[in-house]
Image (cartoon, helix red, strand yellow):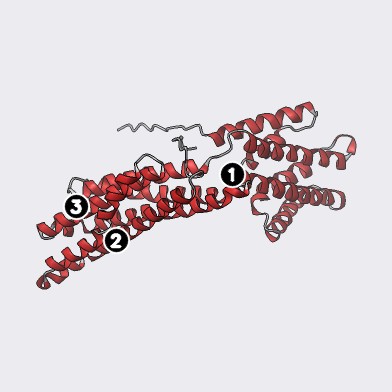
Amino acid sequence: MKKEIFVKMRLGARSLKTGLAVAIALIISKLLHLTPVTMSGIAAAVATQPSVRRSLRTMFDNIQGNVIGAIIAILFVKFIGSNPFVIGLAVIIVIVIMLKMRLHPTINLTMVTVIVIMSGQPPEGDFTKYALERIILVLIGVVCATIVNIVFLPPNYENRLYYKILNQTNELLKWIRLMSQHASEHTKIKQELASFDENKLKIDNYYHWYKEERTYFKKNRFAKHRRAVIFRQMIASTNKLHDILKVFYRTEQDFHNLPEPFKDTLKKRLDGLMNYHERILLKFNGKIRDEHHEEYAKDTCQYKKKITESFIDFYDETAQTHWLNVFPLIAEIVAYSQLLEHLDMLVESFQTYHKSANKMNLVEENEE
C-alpha cells in the first residue's frame, strides 16, 4: 500500500528576511572583492534571529566570538601549524572559551571561522591579511542580518501570540464540547492532545520573544507590561482548558455515568464558562460590546458556586468510589472559572486605564 506524504510549506517573514540578508551579504562581499563570499552568506543565515532585541545581542556576541576565534586561529597557524589535528585542537579551545564567556549561540559560526581561516591557503603567504578578510566577511553577514531584521518586516509577536492563543483555545473548546456530548473518537483525541502539547511550547516561545522585545518610548512601556500580564493569564487559562481536556479524556466514561441531572448541570456550566472564555478574548480584541459582556460575566461568575452546590446535592455516599473518579474534573473546572474571572478583570482594567494603548489592531498571520 502506497502512502503519499504532503508537506505544507509556509513562507514566513523570518524566511524572507533570512534570504534577503544572505543576498545582501553576498552582494556586498562581491563588491568589496572579498573571498570566499559564501562565508558572509553563512554568517547572515546563522545570525538571523526571531526578535529585534535578540538580533542586536547576537550581532555583538558574534562579533566578539568571531574576533576571539580568528585571533586563536592566527596564533595557532603562526606558532603551531595547520594540520587537521591542530585545527581540531583549536576548535576545542574555542568551544571551551565560548562556553566560559557564555557565548553559546556564537559557537557554530566561530567554529566555521576558525576552520576556514586555518584550512585555507593564503596567497603570497600573507596569512594575517587573509585571516582579517575572513573576519570582515563574517561581520558583513552578521551586520546585514541584524539590519534586515530591524528594517524589513520587524516581527509583531503581540499579534502572533494572540492568534496562537486564540487558535489553541478554539480547538480545545471544540474537542471538550464533542467529549461532553459523547461524540468524539478516542484515538483522534489522543493525537490531538499531542498536537496541543506542541502548540503549547510554541505559545511559550512566542510569549518569551514578545517579552524580549523592547519598547523604545517610555510612555508605552507600562502599557506593554500590562499586556504581557494579560497574555500570561490568557496562556494560563488556555493551559487549564488543556488540563480539562486531558482529565476529560481519562474520565469520559465516569462522566457519562454520572446522575443525569448533575451531568446536565456540569455540562451547562462548563459550556457557559467556555462561552465566557471566548467572549473575553473577543473583548480584548475589541470585537464585543462591554455592556453585553458585563451582564454575561455576572451570571458566569456564579458558576463555580453552582457547580459545588449541585455536586453536594447529588453526592451519593454509597457510590463514593465512582465519585472519586470525577473529582479531578470538577476541581479543574472550578480552577478554570477562577482563572477566567481574573483574566476578565485584567482585560477590563487594561481597557479602562490604557485607552490609547488598548487598540490592538490584530491581523491574523501565517506561521513561519
Q: Amino acid at mark 3?
A: Lys
Furthest residue toward bottom: 317
User: Which quadrant would the N terminus be assigned to in this image?
Assistant: top left
Q: Position of residue 212 (x, y in %)?
A: 58, 50
Q: Is residue 87 visible?
A: no
Determine the residue positioned at 18% across, 65% down: 309
Foreground residue, 359 or 45?
Answer: 359
Q: Amino acid at mark 1?
A: Ser
Looking at marks 2 and 1 on the same chain, the residue that comes earlier in the sequence is marked by: 1
Label 1 secondary element: loop
Label 3 secondary element: helix
Disc 1: which residue? 51
Q: Is residue 344 visible?
A: yes
Residue 332 is tagged as 2
Q: Position of residue 292 (x, y in %)?
A: 29, 45
Q: How many marks?
A: 3
Label 2 secondary element: helix
